[in-house]
Image (cartoon, rainbow, N blue to C red):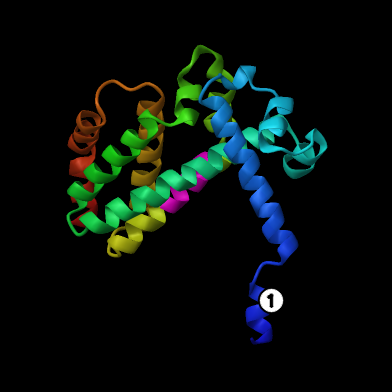
Amino acid sequence: MSASTAAARPSLAEESRAQRRDAILDAVGELLADDSWHDVTMAEIAGRARVSRQTLYNAFGSRDELAQAYLLREAGRFLSAVEEAVVSAAPDARRALNSAAELFLSLASTHPMVRALSTQEGEELVALATVRGGALLIGMTDRLSELITANWPDVDPEGARLLAATLVRLAISHAVLPTGPPEETAADIVRILGPYIDELLA
């Protein structure tokens, strides 16, 4: 094994920290399946993850930081699925957008994170995801913008970013407050944004 390969591999301590972090975030998701974020305590999360409260605070710093870490991880998982949908549907941009939007909204409809955001007591999480959620919105927009330019390299980068930012905000809004089935909402999004997509690809 070369020195560079050994250096690239995570150490046992790093792997252990990553596994513990995932276990804690999994515990957050399990608790959100039954309760609103307002009612979930750090003690409950620590107990579900089988770690001490001090370990919890050492790993995430605060309750808000823990919530944001959970939101970022789950958003990343959503986007991984969206990426697969876009790649499989390209080069038809409208069909790719429709597939991606429908998949995102379908996943969101049964996800504990979105259920928690949708409850009356979910204002705290909504604020973390939107008003105070710069990292979440910017991260999702960056990743979606990169996905658009990777699959349609002739697209203007500024136009791709505008499309990505609009899609992210629409997706979050419809996920939290759905107005109809995912397939209908996705079709509406494509109908509205389709002409702009055609313009970008022209």
Say if the magenta span includes residue 133.
no
Quadrant placement of the C terminus: bottom left
65 and 31: which is toward the camera: 31
Q: Which residues are magenta?
A: 136-143
Residue 141, above or below 117:
below
Q: Quadrant of residue 124?
A: top right
Residue at position x 64%, y 51% from top?
19
Residue at position x 35%, y 27% from top?
174
Q: Quadrant of residue 180?
A: top left
Q: x, y percentage for residue 84?
A: 32, 55
Residue at position x 74%, y 26% from top?
43
Amino acid at dot 1: Ala
Q: x, y percentage for residue 70?
A: 58, 38
Element assignment for label 1: helix
Residue at position x 67%, y 78% from top?
6
* Side (left or right) of 29 relative to 106: right
Residue 131, above or below 35:
below
Residue at the far bottom: name it: 2
Q: x, y percentage for residue 184?
A: 20, 29
Which residue carries the number 1 mark? Answer: 7
**Taken as a whole, is the magenta stretch helix, strand or loop?**
helix
159 and 28: which is toward the camera: 28
* Side (left or right) of 116 relative to 82: right
Say if the magenta span includes residue 140.
yes
* Side (left or right) of 77 relative to 167: right
* Side (left or right) of 75 relative to 202: right
Q: Residues within 10 Å of mark 1 (few under 14, many from 20)?
A: few
Q: x, y percentage for residue 147?
A: 37, 56
Quadrant placement of the N terminus: bottom right
